Amino acid sequence: MTPLDILKAVSVPVLWATGFVLAKVAIVDFPPVLLMALRFTLTALVLVWFFRPPKHLWGKLFVVALISGSIQYSLTFSGLKHLDASTAGLIVQTEVPFAALTAAMFLRERLTLLMVAGMLVAFLGVGVLSGEPKLEGQELYVLMVLGGAFTWAIGQVMVRSIGEIGGFVMISGVAICATPQLFVASYLFEDGQWEAIMSAGWSVWIAVVYMGLIMTALAYAIWYDLLGRLPVNNVAPFLLLLPVAVVIESVLFLEEELTPLKVVGGVLILIGVATLIFAQRPGKPQIKATPDPI
């Protein structure tokens, strides 16, 4: 990897982490599912002109968008509304062990002892993290973020059935399908949407623009450029910077407290995820090659 490639690889998790922190600011007074609907609306409007999926895949893309887009983002960001961004950002990393688990369940991919150990360590980290006194009474929201991670993992198994259509075609198709789904979900489960839009401050619209254009479109452009030119095993470890960046930005910009339990739980989650990334067999890059830009 050249110095420029390393800079690009570092920039992607930082861009994703910044979007997560901006989302936390926006959803304090704004419905989270509606925020996701606006985000994907912008992403779809930008990408559809250049990366339009084949017509015969729309049915599959609709289901993938429902599982790994609409349901996943609704759960994750509704949970984020009630949790520290740093806590939610760490819990989201369980997507990796969940992806390994679902691949073993539905695709019959073999789990090595090292991978199982990594899964157990990651989930142990979530258990430690959940023991924070600040999370007392917030168990439902922890479960929502965990549910979002599990739903994303199921979606990745479904993505495999679509075949290789290119990362941006996939993103475009998911964004197009998820947009109406998220608006319907917001209508069914949230209220005060119109009032929220009319009274939204600049932080909400900055979050929408950033998440739609920078966090999704630009960050994925950089990421898939790297994956297209370099071995996956060289690029994937940089994903470990994502939870670190989320925690650092949450402490610096949201003034969240970095407690001992959060540090210990976060380190355990990182060790578990790192073990899974490095323990994957050659030729099985799906977990590493399909990151989720929380």
Image: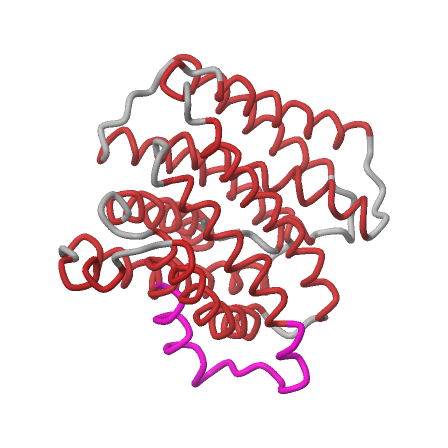
Tell me if residue 35 is in the magenta stretch.
no
Residue at the image position 62 percent from the left and 26 percent from the top: 123
Quarter of the image where one finds residue 202: bottom left
Residue at the image position 68 percent from the left and 35 percent from the top: 276
Tell me if residue 48 is in the magenta stretch.
yes
Main SS of the magenta part reads helix
Residue 83 lies, with reference to residue 209, above or below; the image says above
Who is closer to the viewer here, 191 or 147?
191
Residue 147 lies, with reference to residue 275, above or below; the image says below
Q: Percent from the top left, x then y, of residue 113?
A: 81, 28
Q: How many marks?
A: 0
Residue at the image position 57 percent from the left and 68 percent from the top: 167
Q: Percent from the top left, x then y, of residue 247?
A: 36, 31
Q: Percent from the top left, x then y, of residue 5?
A: 46, 54
Who is closer to the viewer here, 288 or 48?
48
Who is closer to the viewer here, 265 or 154?
154
Residue at the image position 15 percent from the left and 64 percent from the top: 198
Q: Specify the color scheme.
A: secondary structure
41 displayed left or right of 25: right
Give the residues in magenta: 39-60
Residue 70 lies, with reference to residue 123, above or below; the image says below
Q: Percent from the top left, x then y, of residue 254?
A: 23, 34
